Amino acid sequence: MTTAPSDSLLLEKDRTAIVFIEFQREWLDDDGKLFVNLVEDKAAFRRAEQRAALVLAAARENGWNIAHAGLDLRHDPGYQVFGSGDGAGLKRAIPAAGTWTGSGAEFAPPFVPVAGEFQVRGRTGASVLKNSTLDAYLRNNRIDTIVLLGFATHVCVESTLREAHDLGLNAFLVTDGTAAFTEAQHDHVLAHVVHHYGRALDSETLIELLGR
């Protein structure tokens, strides 16, 4: 999918944040637990990683607001925030998998935050806005538009897109800078979900906009 630049797609630098969701070793290491056990279409996943790296480089070069939104439970190895795994959904699945409490919670190069980039803290939900410092960062810096890249399209990226919409934010999903476990899952979100809550654009279009 290629999205042609237009006036309606112009992003205001001061009012936009490029949000990188879970570019961490659980997903990006060849032996990362999530990459090994959940990702079926690994080539598509790696393509999304590569396109996101190009977006990050362009955003850094041109001085855009960058936020790194991971999930880091190294301070809570017993998963107490999730009821120690007694719930359902991710509250059960994450403790069962034993993810996000070890080295897999580290950001993977080149997505390691550098000086001046915001690192989201406190997140407890599928959405990276849930109980995290991202909402305060956006509000306090008068940012009303977010551009989402990361993993997985049909879980945390989609959850963030939906919550951003309900909070009154303008949200964009980068079609080739996100990936799901399968391409079918990814394509379903693009075809049937995104237009309800935001807009889609591809990385080539985004990089062009970042350079304007």
Image: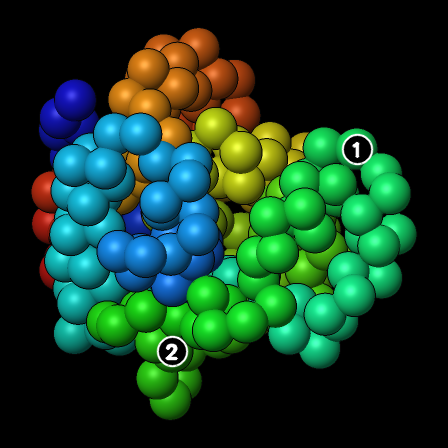
207 left or right of 97 in image: left
In the rendered image, which quarter contains the C terminus? Answer: bottom left
39 left or right of 3 in image: right
Colour scheme of the picture:
rainbow
Q: Is any part of residue 165 visible from this angle?
A: no
| Residue sitting at x 26%, y 72% | 109
Judging depth in this view, the residue of 105 and 201 nearest the camera is 105
Judging depth in this view, the residue of 47 and 66 nearest the camera is 47
Q: Label for residue 205?
A: none
Specify the quadrant of the image occupied by residue 107. bottom left
Q: Position of residue 33 (x, y in %)?
A: 44, 52
Residue furthest top as drawn: 192
> What's the residue type where badge 1 is placed?
Ala
Q: Label for residue 88?
A: 1
**N-term mark: 2 or 1:** 1
Q: Position of residue 2 (x, y in %)?
A: 13, 26
Judging depth in this view, the residue of 135 and 92 nearest the camera is 92
Label 2 crowd (10 A; few <14 / some 14-19 / many >=20): some
Label 2 belongs to which residue?
A: 113
| Residue sitting at x 36%, y 46% | 35
Where is 204 relative to 60, above or below?
Answer: above
